[in-house]
Image: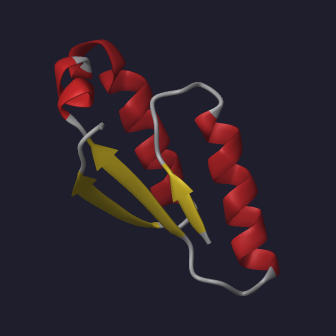
Amino acid sequence: MLVCLSPSPTNAKVIRTAARMAGAFHADFTAILVETEQLKKEYSRISRSMEANISLAKEFRANVITCMGTIL
């Protein structure tokens, strides 16, 4: 099961749902954070919510992956 991490307040619900689905299907659970230049610029504003969502994914034993991306 793959979930995309974001600073959105609704991302916590997405993480919880994906964790339940991964458990139900006996599947691996991976959470991915795609870092973009825009995300880096806004980091000071979104850091608390982003860190909270990353921590939540780790609590559910997600394999958290960070990669670089660009917005076209």
Can you say which quadrant of the picture contains the C terminus? Answer: top left
Q: Relative to 17, is 47 on the left or the right?
A: left
- Display colour scheme: secondary structure
58 and 36: which one is in front?
36
User: What residue lies at 37% left-to-right and 23% top-to-bottom?
Assistant: 48
Q: Is residue 34 above or below residue 67?
A: above
Q: Position of residue 18 (x, y in %)?
A: 69, 60
**Farthest residue toward the top?**
45
Q: Relative to 70, is 9 on the left or the right?
A: right
User: What residue lies at 24% left-to-right and 25% top-to-bottom?
Assistant: 38
User: What residue lies at 36% left-to-right and 50% top-to-bottom?
Assistant: 33
**Farthest residue toward the right?**
24
Q: Is residue 64 above or below residue 56?
A: below
Quadrant for residue 22, please give it: bottom right
**Farthest residue toward the front?**
72
Q: Position of residue 29 (x, y in %)?
A: 56, 72
User: What residue lies at 17% left-to-right and 31% top-to-bottom?
Assistant: 37
Tag count in the figure? 0
Q: Is residue 24 above or below residue 8?
A: below
Quadrant for residue 11, please give it: top right
Q: Position of residue 47 (x, y in %)?
A: 31, 25
Can you say which quadrant of the picture contains the N terminus? Answer: bottom right
Q: Is residue 23 above or below residue 56?
A: below
Q: Relative to 54, is 61 on the left or the right?
A: right
Quadrant for residue 45, please give it: top left
